[in-house]
Amino acid sequence: ATFGNLSDRLSETFKNLRKKGTLSASDVDGTVREIRRALIDADVAFDVVKEFTGRVRERALGDEVNKALNPAQQVVKIVNDELVGILGGQQRRLEFAKTPPTVIMLAGLQGAGKTTLAGKLAKWLTKDGHTPLLVAADLQRPNAVTQLGVVAEQAGATLFAPEPGNGVGDPVRVAKDSIKFARDKQYDTVIIDTAGRLGVDAELMKQAANIRKAVDPDEVLFVIDAMIGQDAVATAKAFQEGVDFTGVVLSKLDGDARGGAALSVASVTGRPIIFASTGETLDEFEPFHPDRMASRILDLGDILTLIEQAQEAFDEEEARKVAEKFATDTFTLDDFLKQMQQLRNMGSIKKMMGMLPGMGQMRDQLDNFDEREIVRTEAIIQSMTKAERTNPKLLNGSRRLRIARGSGMTVTDVNQLVQRFEQAAKMMKTVAKGGVPQVPGMGPV
Ligand code: GDP
């Protein structure tokens, strides 16, 4: 994943830190230096890195770490806090107009993912009871209108485009007409797809600025491809000057690039990241939560997104029951297996597993993750007695050996499964009680 390498490096840094009971100033400096290198290697903008590490260092040398029972964990918490900060702090939701239609304009370079985003937004809004209209104001690229039409159809939304054969067409005019059309036909959101170029250029900026002036959008979303590396910051600044925007959408976060530059965008422009795009299909898209992204990067897991997606895939009654089991410590291996089987409904198992805490080191294995994993889990759990499934504490060495034999797995496989179960149950329990999950393997604070 995009932040895989950064994530691994930071995990490694923290692992070394955890070996120490108390932290000296030179331990802190060493850690800060490693974090700085990891961020720079991940393409995070230099100014952002400097500010970030400065703040981490100052806090890490202060009382909050000195007095902490577990100094290393406290440092991780500080890094987490500061990372949430550079990602924009609080979650910023999409803003709707008091009187519909809400007008959302998309801007960004060609290939950034604007057209795809238009479809994703439309689908997401429709699910929420909105009635979006997709507007083709990209009259530059030959196929743009057709492409938006395809996306609109996939999203089940209406396309607004200039009549074919109506000459070249004026994007400002199209945008303006679309709003009148939306008002007349009662569409409550208008999503305007604008033209992009391969590089920043003055004419493109002017056209986008003109559209903005003409329709006065409630939101202007700047779409940035997380894979473009260091150019992200310069591009963002150019768009901020040329068009200005109210929010950022990070796209292609599923890619393998280093992605750090995209992490700098909120900090450098002072504009919040509102959405993240994580794939080519219209469902691979989610509201952006700075805190969740930070804990994903620090490999603290993204339990909250996991729970939300689980709630979408399961029915609510089921989700409520599971949450209750977590909270009351009555979640069993049977439940765990049932959950895993239900994960099948959830599209990409790999993505879901990636959100589990502590899975960072397993990322390579994750890439090979497939249905067979579930089959193996099933085999192991089904080789357990009813009592063992209900009360995993019974699983001593000889029982584990018996289960391994019975399921055709190794004792290590059994151990890993039990460990994963215990970790998940523990984290979920904390979350269910409204707490903040602990860093796995770091012991209590
Ligand atoms: P536009 O020129 O800004 O409208 O960009 P498009 O929406 O046409 O996207 C350009 C390419 O990137 C297309 O092939 C999309 O399928 C792809 N794309 C868009 N968003 C994502 C994403 O989040 N992940 C991945 N992997 N590909 C994406």
Image (cartoon, rainbow, N blue to C red):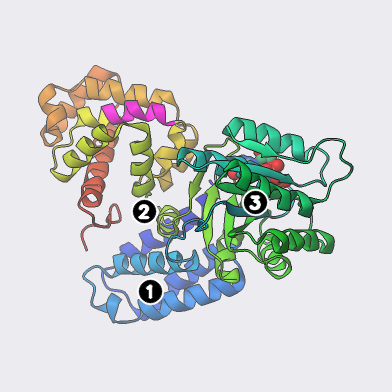
| 341 in magenta | yes
Classify mark 2: residues with Cα within 10 Å, few (<14), some (14-19) or many (20+). Answer: many
Residue tagged by mark 2?
A: 300
- Dot 2 or dot 3: first in sequence order is 3
Q: State the residue in front, 218 or 356.
A: 218
Is residue 245 covered in magenta?
no
The mark closer to the camera, 3 or 1, is 3
Task: Identify residue for label 3.
Answer: 227
Span colored in magenta? 338-346
The residue pinned by badge 1 equals 27
Mark drawn on residue 171: none
* Gap in angstroms between the C-alphas marked 3 and 1: 34 Å
Q: Secondary structure at mark 2?
A: loop
Check disc 2 and give the amino acid type: Leu
Q: Is residue 112 something one can see in this rendering?
A: no
- Of the two numbered discs 2 and 1 in the rendering, the one whose residue sits closer to the viewer: 2
Measured from the top left, where is residue 231 in percent x and y?
A: 70, 61
Q: In this view of the protein, which residue sits in the foreground, 333 or 243?
A: 243
> Is label 3 within 8 A of ligand 1 (CB to nearest ligand atom)?
no
Percent of width and height locating residue 338: 27, 27
